[in-house]
């Protein structure tokens, strides 16, 4: 499951990139099953590859490009033969019935769901005074409501089992705002409140069920906020514009998709059981 409209910005979390990650790197996630929305390209593909490199079985969601999804599936199976299974699942995250169906598909295909990464997102950029109701509603529906629709059935399964990880991919724009991105900034900022609320509710529900134990994996909910990410969509951005963007970043360069993926697989690990309700910035120091 991925985005439902084309991205207007070349510098968000929706474009495709080859991270170059290949081969098993560890066993932190061996036996775990991860569902990554927007998982067949861009940051989502990098996350899938990073999770697979740690032994996880990966279910990649996509919206409509089946050919790209099948190509991604072939590649990840070839690059990580020693990891778990890989599958792809089509759906529109802004439709709650699709979200419930895809979670069920993953449970039927893999038998469990340990990790949900809500990565799918879109942009439809315009100045606020010229932004249409459709522009506003579409972005909110995918980026914010879609993340909730996916988290709801996943959290239900995780609470029943007593373990799980939910990780949202927000954006530094949700923390700083940006000209021409009122809808995108609001949707990504909303994920921060959703993260903290679900983290509290997950802990509450486990405590009520007597499943909070000192040495347990538990259920955690966290958010990663990428900055400007180097993707294939940057090819159409003029060099002068890129230079201005880089000038805003203290580290002086764009983020690589695998740098976001590395934080996601860290948060997904069993050993990260004491980290919940937190926002992890991966933005080169843009927001500090």
Image: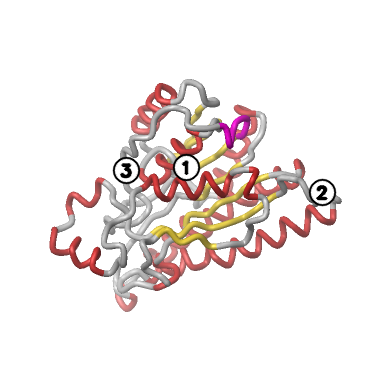
Q: Which mark is residue 16?
A: 3
Q: Secondary structure at mark 1?
A: loop
* Total residue callouts: 3
Circles 2 and 3 in contact, beta carbons < 8 Å: no
Magenta: main secondary structure equals loop
Say whether disc 2 or disc 3 marks the residue closer to the N-terminus.
3
State the extent of the magenta-drawn residues as a range.
Answer: 27-32
Q: Is residue 164 left or right of residue 11?
A: right
Q: Residue at x 45, y 60 (%)?
A: 225
Q: Residue at x 34, y 33 (%)?
A: 68
**Whole-percent x, y for residue 133 in the image:** 40, 69
- Residue sticking out furthest to the bottom: 129
Where on the picture, by quarter, is residue 284? bottom left
Whether residue 93 is visible here, answered yes or no, is: yes
Residue highlighted by disc 1: 1
Query: Does residue 59 sit above or below 175 in this rendering?
Result: above
Q: Which mark is residue 54?
A: none
**Whole-percent x, y for residue 177 in the image:** 39, 73
261 or 117: nearer the viewer: 261
Q: Residue 31 magenta-drawn?
A: yes
Query: In 3D space, how far apart are the residues under numbered discs 2 and 1 (Cα atoms)?
Result: 31 Å
55 or 271: nearer the viewer: 271
Q: Secondary structure at mark 3?
A: loop
Q: Residue at x 52, y 32 (%)?
A: 26
Q: Secondary structure at mark 2?
A: loop
Q: Residue at x 72, y 60 (%)?
A: 201
Q: Which mark is residue 211?
A: 2
Q: Nearer the viewer, mark 2 or mark 1?
A: 2
Q: Look at the image and tell me in which quarter the C terminus lies.
A: bottom left
């Amino acid at each position: 499951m991925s985005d439902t409209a084309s991205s207007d910005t070349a510098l968000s979390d929706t474009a495709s990139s080859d991270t170059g990650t290949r081969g098993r790197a560890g066993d932190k996630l061996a036996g775990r099953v991860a569902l990554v929305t927007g998982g067949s390209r861009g940051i989502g593909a990098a996350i899938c590859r990073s999770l697979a490199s740690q032994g996880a079985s990966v279910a990649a969601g996509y919206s409509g490009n089946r050919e790209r999804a099948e190509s991604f599936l072939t590649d990840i199976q070839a690059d990580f033969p020693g990891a778990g299974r890989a599958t792809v699942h089509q759906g529109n995250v802004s439709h709650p019935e699709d979200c419930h169906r895809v979670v069920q598909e993953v449970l039927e295909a893999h038998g469990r769901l340990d990790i949900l990464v809500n990565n799918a997102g879109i942009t439809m950029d315009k100045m606020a005074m010229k932004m249409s109701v459709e522009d506003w509603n579409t972005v909110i529906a995918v980026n914010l409501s879609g993340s909730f629709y996916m988290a709801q059935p996943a959290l239900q399964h995780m609470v029943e089992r007593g373990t799980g990880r939910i990780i949202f991919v927000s954006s530094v724009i949700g923390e700083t705002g940006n000209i021409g991105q009122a809808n995108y900034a609001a949707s990504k900022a909303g994920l921060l409140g959703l993260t903290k609320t679900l983290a509290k509710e997950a802990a509450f529900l486990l405590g009520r069920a007597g499943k909070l134990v000192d040495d347990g994996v538990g259920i955690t909910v966290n958010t990663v906020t990428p900055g400007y990410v180097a993707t294939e969509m940057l090819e159409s951005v003029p060099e002068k514009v890129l230079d201005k963007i880089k000038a805003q970043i203290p580290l002086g360069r764009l983020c690589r998709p695998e740098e976001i993926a590395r934080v996601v697989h860290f948060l997904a690990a069993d050993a990260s059981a004491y980290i919940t309700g937190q926002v992890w910035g991966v933005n080169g120091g843009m927001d500090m």
